[in-house]
Image (cartoon, rainbow, N blue to C red):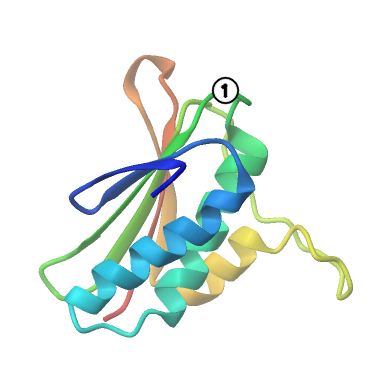
Amino acid sequence: MGEAACHENEIVVKNDLSVVAEVRRFVRLVTGQWGMDDFVPCLVASELVTNALRYASAPDCGVTFRIGRNDDGALWLEIQDATCELPRIQYADTISEAGRGLFIVDQFARCWGVRPLAGNAGKVVFAVLDA
């Protein structure tokens, strides 16, 4: 993976929107190992990563994406970045291509939210998807 470093269920990507396709490939690989459909996880992962890279990451800093499963089989996705600014849902007009990221996450996720990291080190935005 050119722009990414990969660990078990975690991928670190540089601040370049072209890495979103790598994240989708990573999600397909992991969900495939678990025998899960990948459409919604890929969609939500794309929106979380794009949002983090567009709004929350310094030009020379990357973000960390993680994926896992809860005991009930639900899938969780999270993106960690180094800024403390909280994300918010923007309501785009019908022809705009931007501004739908967290709205899409909100539509497909059982729940989603933000966890601040200690010492103002950044935050984690997470989403939980039903199995």
Q: Quadrant of the C terminus?
A: bottom left
Q: Residue at x 54, y 67 (%)?
A: 106
Name the spot of residue 35 as percent of width and height, x first.
20, 84
Q: Residue at x 75, y 58 (%)?
A: 99
- Outermost residue to the top: 119
- Whether residue 128 appears in this view of the structure is no
Which residue is more in the foreground, 59 or 57?
A: 59
- Whether residue 38 appears in this view of the structure is yes
Quick check: 45 above or below 87? below
Q: Residue at x 76, y 62 (%)?
A: 91
- Outermost residue to the left: 71
Helix, strand or loop for disc 1? loop
Which residue is more in the foreground, 38 or 18?
A: 18
- How many numbered discs, if any? 1
Judging by the rendered image, the residue that carries numbered circle 1 is 60
Name the spot of residue 11 as percent of width and height, x first.
33, 46
Q: Quadrant of residue 15?
A: top right
Q: Quadrant of residue 30?
A: bottom left
Is 103 placed left or right of 37 in the picture? right
Name the spot of residue 75 as percent of width and height, x first.
27, 69
Give the amino acid at mark 1: Asp
Badge 1 crowding class, 10 Å Cα cut-off, few under 14, some 14 to 19, many 20 or more, is few
Q: Residue at x 59, y 34 (%)?
A: 56
Which residue is more in the foreground, 75 or 6?
A: 6
Is 32 placed left or right of 43 in the picture? left
Is 64 placed left or right of 86 in the picture? left
